Image (cartoon, grey):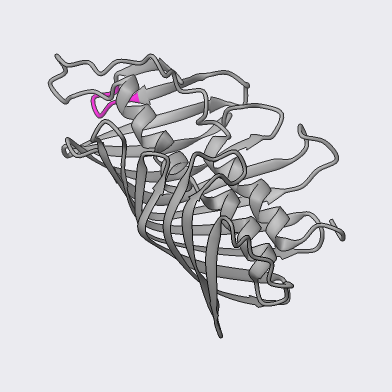
Amino acid sequence: MKNISSYQILKSLFLVLVFTGFQSCSKDAEMDLMSDGAELTQFELRTILEADAYTGLMDEVLMDLIEKNGPTAAKIADQDCYEISYTESGFRVEFGNCVLNTTENVNGVLEVTYSESVGNTSFSVNYTGFFVGAVALSGTRTIEISHSGETNIDLVVQSDMTVKLPEGTVLTEKGTKALQIQLGTSLEFTIYNLSGSWTVSDGSATYIVDIREPLEGNLACPYAVTGLMDIEKNDLEIGVDFGDGTCDNEVTLIYPNGDREILEL
């Protein structure tokens, strides 16, 4: 840990936040068009769990930019890719059809403000006229990280973001997620838990999400293995139970009348 910067830690944590437990939702899942709204479909659960993959689409690139242009950095810009100007508390970047870290072409403006102290880093990013490929991003993400010792790290992300997908779907995500991670000697012994509450909308429905019991897992398993998430849809509250600690791709939906349904991620 002593040779790893806060920004390298952040990049690793974002991969956990976006992908662990959520990345394997079926891309072939279809919406149940006959649903009367009294259930939660696989399509809807995938929309909720994968929203952060879109709203956080630039997070890893941001870590590289801040590491190169942050308060203690040497200010390294790529004039062929973007133009950058600095303020006392951050910088403004205008991208011109860049390809960064294997992303699709990036265009638009990011305005970054940050602060850093011993053991703590925070920054806020505003997206304006911003595109990654044909995906349009707008809004603000504020990220705070703190770590004590060499193994315990806390990450808090506040999002107020809108994403327009190429086919016209508009996703919004607003709320807070908190990730705690304890670094271990291997992926299996690197443990995390995720908590928070946020709202996701896909233009046709709005879902209020609250993690009642933190979602927990380890980096050797591609899914969260325990924890309970409540999802409110059309005044119907449905529980999503991530399991008993077994690494599998199943969750249990718990309906208000006590009915249970197994759903594959």
Location of residue 11 with respect to 65 vertically, above or below: above
Identify which residue is drawn at 30% across, 15% down: 30
The secondary structure making up most of the magenta span is loop
Identify which residue is drawn at 34% across, 26% down: 254
Residue 50, x across and y down, in percent? 42, 35
Residue 107, x across and y down, in percent? 43, 52
To which quarter of the image does residue 204 belong? top left
To which quarter of the image does residue 163 belong? top left
Q: Is residue 122 magenta?
A: no
Which residues lie in the magenta part?
A: 254-258
Identify which residue is drawn at 55% across, 44% down: 99
Residue 19, x across and y down, in percent? 55, 35
**Can residue 36 be spotted in the picture?**
yes
Tell me if 10 is positioned left or right of 229 in this view.
Answer: right
Tell me if 59 is positioned left or right of 263 in this view.
Answer: right
**Can residue 113 be spotted in the picture?**
no
Residue furthest out toward the bottom: 88
Location of residue 193 with respect to 78 vertically, above or below: above
To which quarter of the image does residue 130 belong? bottom left
Location of residue 171 with respect to 70 vertically, above or below: above
Identify which residue is drawn at 28% across, 26% down: 255
Q: Which image quarter is the N terminus in?
A: bottom right
